[in-house]
Image: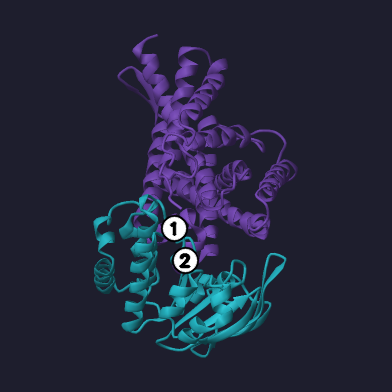
Amino acid sequence: MLKVNNIHTFYGKIEALKGISVEVNEGEIVTLIGANGAGKSTTLKTISGQLHPTEGDVQFLGETVSGMLSHEVTAKRIIQVPEGRHIFPQMSVQENLDMGAFLRNDKAEIAADIERAFELFPRLRERKNQKGGTLSGGEQQMLAMARAMMAKPLLLMLDEPSMGLAPVIVDTIFETIVRLNKEGMTILLVEQNAHMALSIANRGYVLETGKVVLEGPGKELLANELVRKTYLGEV
Amino acid sequence: MSMEIIGQQMVNGITLGGLYALIALGYTLVYGILLLINFAHSEMFMTGAYVGYFTLIGLSKIDFFTSSNVGLLLLYVLAFLAGMIVTGLLGMLTERFAYRPLRNAPRLAPLISAIGVSLFLQNAALLWISSRSIPFPILFEIRQDDIAGVNVSSMQILIVGTTILLLLVLDTFVSKTRVGKAMRAVSQDREAAGLMGVNINYIIALTFFIGPALGGAAGIFSGMYYGSIKYNMGFIPGIKSFTAAVIGGIGNLRGAMLGGFTLGMIEALAAGFISTGYKDVIAFAILILVLVFKPGGLLGESVVEKV
């Protein structure tokens, strides 16, 4: 479904990605793990069109999407939930969800999808008319995911969904990811919490300073000695 | 101090405030989207006045426009359309060539670029048109009405009426339409708006059309109200309107409207009660007071964002 071929991306003057290749097949959960600055978020941003590779390309359903601007990538229904959530602070929960459906004009279906989002995250229904900026971090993460779902993604990309959240909320978020995947959603997940990410992923990639150093099925990586030492904190 | 004088000054204040509000919207729209204080905005005001002037002068040579009231109305509508469209396009051009290349530069760079555009346009008008003030044509008879002892001219009614209409149209556009919603999204979080599928360059270009177009309309009103235009006519109203935008809470549309009318009213009342010479002193003293007690401005956003 998604093929990232040997991309090199600069972040300012720093070459953040030094030839990364990642593949996501339909129906999979694929995760990118690695330390801070390994290039995980940069990879997502390059796929979503916020950054552009100087070398290599990104293919989605057989079409080259690298070089497109982020709104054009969104139109291909590759939807990214950005790191730090990026909720519209002055808009209500309802308006944030409406923004998620910005490129759609099937009013009746949008209303039905908002209903579905509220079923997925009942907390959001209670906060429907509250401004996005006043929500707690966990609620904002739920809203960011619900908002992304409003765009009817073919590929959902999540950038550090567990960052800064209480363990209970992290569990809810991960349960939701698994549930969405069971319903057929293809997911590319970037996480610092390597243990949780690998335990739900079909496949994983380990990134280190802009390169893929290891790849394989999630379970295998969980058992891998290097991964255990470096990312799971075991001695 | 009689009630009549207070009433009179309030009428003058509302008229002046309407002009400030129209210009202030341009500052606040652009600041909301790009966090840039568009110093070239005062020259958009001047450009609108000149385009309106040349349209009026040019078309008034055609009998059709001056021989009947309908023709005259059409003439003014055309002058405003021309002034607003040309100024709007100039605004877009400024963004495309002076600000967009600097979008990822440090924030000081586009600010300096804006000052450059301002100087460029002022001097272009000075060189190519005139260094002196030009009388603005008045092609219709201005009626003076006495309402409860207060003298209200048909010009004031026209200015205030049209201003309020433009403000209502803009407010509805931003709060109700799809594109207006996209504008709000870009101003709150540009990155997220792009991820929602909003074409950011299109929204920024549109903002740089709407703001200057409103400023251009204010320029024509100013020409009609004061009876003359000049290459540097934008400077003082520009600073005042920027102040109005800050009083209202920069980035907030209704704030700019409120700030504009508030500043106009304060100035007019200060001129009536105290002295014309002190009106700016008092207006700016009140600005300082507002900022001391409400640093975000009267309608400044106070939503606490959680990280």
- Could you classify mark 1 by the number of other residues whose Cα lies within 10 Å: few (under 14), some (14-19), or many (20 or more)? many
Identify the amino acid type marked 1. Answer: Ala
Nearest the camera: B60 or A96?
A: A96
Which labelled disc corresponds to residue B185?
1
Element on which disc 2 rests = loop
Whether residue B73 is situated above or below residue A154 in the rendered picture: above
Q: Which chain is cyan?
A: A
Chain of the residue displaying label 1? B
Task: Name which quarter of the figure residue A87 lies in.
Answer: bottom left
Q: Which chain is purple?
A: B
Residue drawn where x is 46% and y is 23% of the image? B266
Residues tagged by mark 2 and mark 1 found on one chain of the structure: yes
Which element is circle 1 on?
helix
Residue B45 appears in the picture as rendered: yes
Q: Nearer the viewer, residue B96 or A117?
A: A117
**Given the current orientation, which residue lies at the most extreme right position?**
B127
- The chain holding disc 2 is B
Looking at the picture, how far across and down is residue B172, in whole percent? 35, 51
In the picture of the structure, the residue carrying the numbered disc 2 is: B198
Mark count: 2
